[in-house]
Amino acid sequence: MASSRVPAMRVAPGRAPLPQPGPAPSPRATKNKLSEDNDAPPPKRSHIFYGSLEEKERERLAKGESGLLGRDRVKAAIEAGNINITSGEVFDLEDHISERQAEVLAEFERRKRARQINVSTDDSEVKACLRALGEPITLFGEGPAERRERLRNILSVVGTDALKKTKKDDEKSKKSKEEYQQTWYHEGPNSLKTARLWIANYSLPRATKRLEEARLYKEIPEATRTSQKQELHKSLRSLNNFCSQIGDDRPISYCHFSPNSKLLATACWSGLCKLWSVPDCNLVHTLRGHNTNVGAIVFHPQATVSLDKKDINLASCAADGSVKLWNLESDEPVADIEGHTMRVARVMWHPSGRFLGTTCYDHSWRLWDLQAQEEILHQEGHSKGVYDIAFHIDGSLAGTGGMDAFGRVWDLRTGRCIMFLEGHLKEIYGINFSPNGYHIATGSGDNTCKVWDLRQRKCVYTIPAHQNLVTGVKFEPTHGNFLLTGAYDNTAKIWTHPGWSPLKTLAGHEGKVMGLDISSDGQLIATCSYDRTFKLWMAE
């Protein structure tokens, strides 16, 4: 049988020969090859040393041997930092281990203390405790159980005394606040004591008379009273603009009827005060004395009735803190009341005519005794400027409204604040007492008018009166059968009493209504405006 030859292949230099195709090896040949591999001696492996070679190297160097770790190589290794031969320094493992053990023991102690701490199961109390400790009262995804556990862990670190300390601090702060809010008194002059006794003697007979009139009115049959109210409401619904007069070159800030209803006093931002005849609206007097915006001008309670024209019949105030007194004959002020250093917003006579009340932007109001010609009371109590003041029909009480959105009712006979009017959201610009003796109306910058009851000492009704801030409120002066309000929405409105339902809207001004008044006989209503005019309203 002829043997076949495989042609030879030339291999390029530097390259391995390619595998040649040939017959597959037999199983016997494979077995022989494996047995040959098993018979081959295992390769020698170098020993691997773990740990420091320092001791070995010292011995080798002491013997003067040189080998794998000869002097040159050792020096090179030392310089390279691969071999570190120390100078006897040691690392104490026991100290390191003891610190770790102390940490573990402290953690166990903390957990032990945490288990012994009693935490309330009331979630609100837990939150209060967390807040007292200055921690967040809740975390994202945290439930009441996790919150209790977090409080327990915090207390185990800071100690339960920290919570007690915070509670003590809170109690101290509460006590200091209470002490700060407590009413305090200081000794006043003898003139104030004399005035208080005089006011008490003046007001008690008037209160007796008012209550007697209320009893007599109650004896009138219900049908008669209802018919009288219906007639009054009918006449009020028929109110129309009777007269309109340009009062000055600048806005008119205030208007006030004389007690005999035949004169109208107006105050203007130009500094002039004018007296007009009613109802024909002719100019009678121009009072010159103020140099800046006049806030108010009011008639003495007895002016044009029993008071002589030469006596003091009017009082006015201005933004520069000046208060001036006038008679009906002279165009210049009779006297000046000095003492205010800031803006005086309103001035009002006591019903007796002996005292004059002024409100100031220095957070106080004052009472002046014109008979003694001195200031007898400088009353603080508001946290911002005091804007308006009104006196009770008996003369026993004074009501003040402030820029702090609060009102206060003061007993002039004792000096105490007997009622705190809290409820308005913005400044109080108007306050007025009803002739019935127990209702108070306040107008505010929150566009509402609130009615308060002195007997219940609370707000009994809130009238959503206007679409802008309310500048003034006024009860009908004889019986208080209706309430008049004016506002910056250019209108004045009339509301029933009681019931507080709208009766009539007095629209006609082109500017903000800044002042209003009702004549003592109840026949005329006056409004003055930013449009420099005042208007008289009368039933047809």
Image (cartoon, helix red, strand yellow):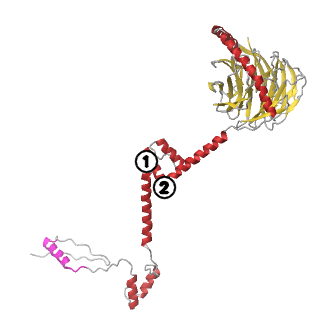
Q: Position of residue 162 (x, y in %)?
A: 53, 52
Give SS at disc 1: helix
Residue 271: quarter of image: top right
Drawn side of residue 39 relative to residue 181, left or right: left
Relative vertical location of residue 54 with respect to residue 232 in this rendering, above or below: below
Relative vertical location of residue 525 with respect to residue 33 in this rendering, above or below: above
Q: Position of residue 460 (x, y in %)?
A: 62, 24
Relative vertical location of residue 518 with respect to residue 1 in this rendering, above or below: above
Magenta part mainly helix, strand or loop? helix
Q: Residues within 10 Å of mark 2 (few under 14, many from 20)?
A: few
Q: Quadrant of the N terminus?
A: bottom left
Quick one: which residue is furthest to the left in this view? Answer: 1
Residue with the mark numbered 2:
157
Q: Position of residue 193 (x, y in %)?
A: 78, 31
Drawn side of residue 175 relative to residue 382, left or right: left
Query: Amino acid under label 2?
Result: Val
Query: Amino acid under label 1?
Result: Glu
Q: Which segment is the magenta one?
A: 25-42
Residue 54: quarter of image: bottom left
Task: Give the foreground label among 2 and 1.
Answer: 2
Residue with the mark numbered 1:
146
